[in-house]
Image (tube, rainbow, N blue to C red):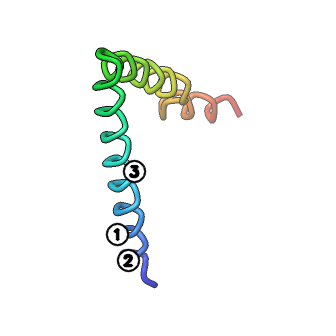
Amino acid sequence: MTEFQGKVRLQDAVLANMVTLSAILEYLDQMHPGAKDIIDRRAVEIAHNLKASQPSFSDQDADHGQD
């Protein structure tokens, strides 16, 4: 298997998961109106926290300068 084929398979798997999650969100929103908005907001908060916890390239460069 080539690297390209592996990337396509990974992209297909990610897309399938996104479709599944979208269907689940729609179902939850039908059963409990407003649930989708609550979940979306929480997902954005989590993504923001994850991004903030990752060191930036400039932080890594500063660390190497102290060696």
User: How far is mark 2 from mark 1, CA to CA?
Assistant: 5 Å
Please tell me which residue is depicted at 34% across the width and 69% down the height of the picture.
8
Density class for disc 2 (Cα within 10 Å; few <14, some 14-19, many ≥20) is few
**Up/down of 10 relative to 51, above or below:** below
At which x and y percent is residue 36? 32, 23
Of helix, strand and loop, which one carries label 3? helix
Q: On the image, numbered disc 1 is attached to which residue?
A: 8
Residue 34 is tagged as: none
Left-right relation of 55 to 45: right
Of the residues shown, which amino acid type is indicated by label 3?
A: Asn
Distance between the alpha carbons at the discs numbered 3 and 1 = 14 Å
Residue type, mark 2 in image: Gln
Which residue is identified by label 2? 5
Task: Say what amino acid the circle numbered 1 marks.
Answer: Val
Q: Residues within 10 Å of mark 3 (few under 14, many from 20)?
A: few
Q: Secondary structure at mark 1?
A: helix
Residue 55 is situated, as x and y percent measured from the top left of the image, at 55, 29
Residue 33, quarter of the rendered image:
top left
**Label 1 CA crowd tier, 10 Å (few <14, some 14–19, many 20+):** few
- Please say if the residues under marks 2 and 3 sit with CB atoms less than 8 Å apart: no
Q: Can you tell which mark lies on residue 17?
A: 3
Instruction: Give the x, y percent position of residue 40.
Output: 35, 23
Q: CA distance from mark 2 to mark 3?
A: 18 Å
